[in-house]
Image (cartoon, helix red, strand yellow):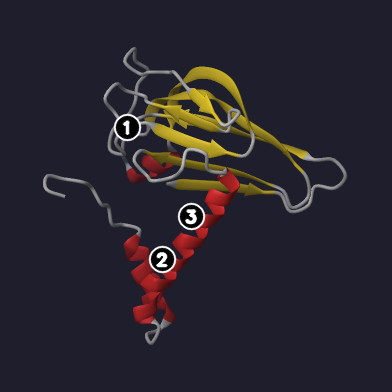
Amino acid sequence: AVVVRYRVERVGDAPVKLTARLFVNGRDHHQETRANDAFQRDVALSREGRLLRMTPYAGGPSLWLAHDGAFAADPAWYFNYRHSAESARGLNDHEDAYTPGVVQCEVADEGSLALVAWSEPCGFDADVDAGALAAELDAAERTRRAALAEPWRSQPAEVARLACAADQFLVWRAGPGS
């Protein structure tokens, strides 16, 4: 799962309107997407529009997004979208990206907007509250990272940081027999 939380600490007298545009590519991280007719643009909404599900390609995984804002459909392809991080790596850095729309909310002091995205199967209840799920996943990740660093506590702090950094480069993929 991917968790994104926008938190407003102090806005003053009037709330701030936060808008997050959603982009979907439906691809492996080593590939690029180009606008195409096989891409399925249908968005299934539930929980009063606070849970979205898309299946970009027939037979592929569904993508889920829980949020605590309001979804506004604004479907479009963004063509020749540039990924600056890929440019810096010397990799292909342009592709097309599909947007089903935006998630918006008004946030007052100490308010937040939570977005939680995952692909099936992930074991989350389809009726989950985005803010609660974001907090739960954040706590679980902090616990996981603390456990990862624990064996290195007697070493210089840099060693524990290196162990945690190395963990970010591990990729787990399902394969035959796994």
Pointer 3 residue: 137
Dot 2, how many residues are within 10 Å of its Cα: few (below 14), some (14-19), or many (20+)? few
For residue 122, the mark is none
* Camera-side residue of 162 and 118: 118
Would residue 67 be found to the left or right of residue 96 on screen?
A: right
Would residue 171 be found to the left or right of residue 130 on screen?
A: left
The amino acid marked with disc number 1 is Pro
The amino acid marked with disc number 2 is Arg
Pointer 1 residue: 61
Can you give x and y, in whole percent of width and height, for residue 36 in the image?
34, 15
User: Measured along the vertical axis of the image, is residue 30 above or below residue 139?
Assistant: above
The amino acid marked with disc number 3 is Leu
Pointer 2 residue: 144
Can you give x and y, in whole percent of width and height, for residue 100 in the image?
51, 23
- Mark 2 or mark 3: name the one nearer the start of the chain: 3
Would residue 13 be found to the left or right of residue 167 on screen?
A: right
Q: Quadrant of residue 48?
A: top right
**SS class, disc 2:** helix
Q: Quadrant of residue 74?
A: top right
Which residue is pictured at 58% across the width and 33% down the height? 50
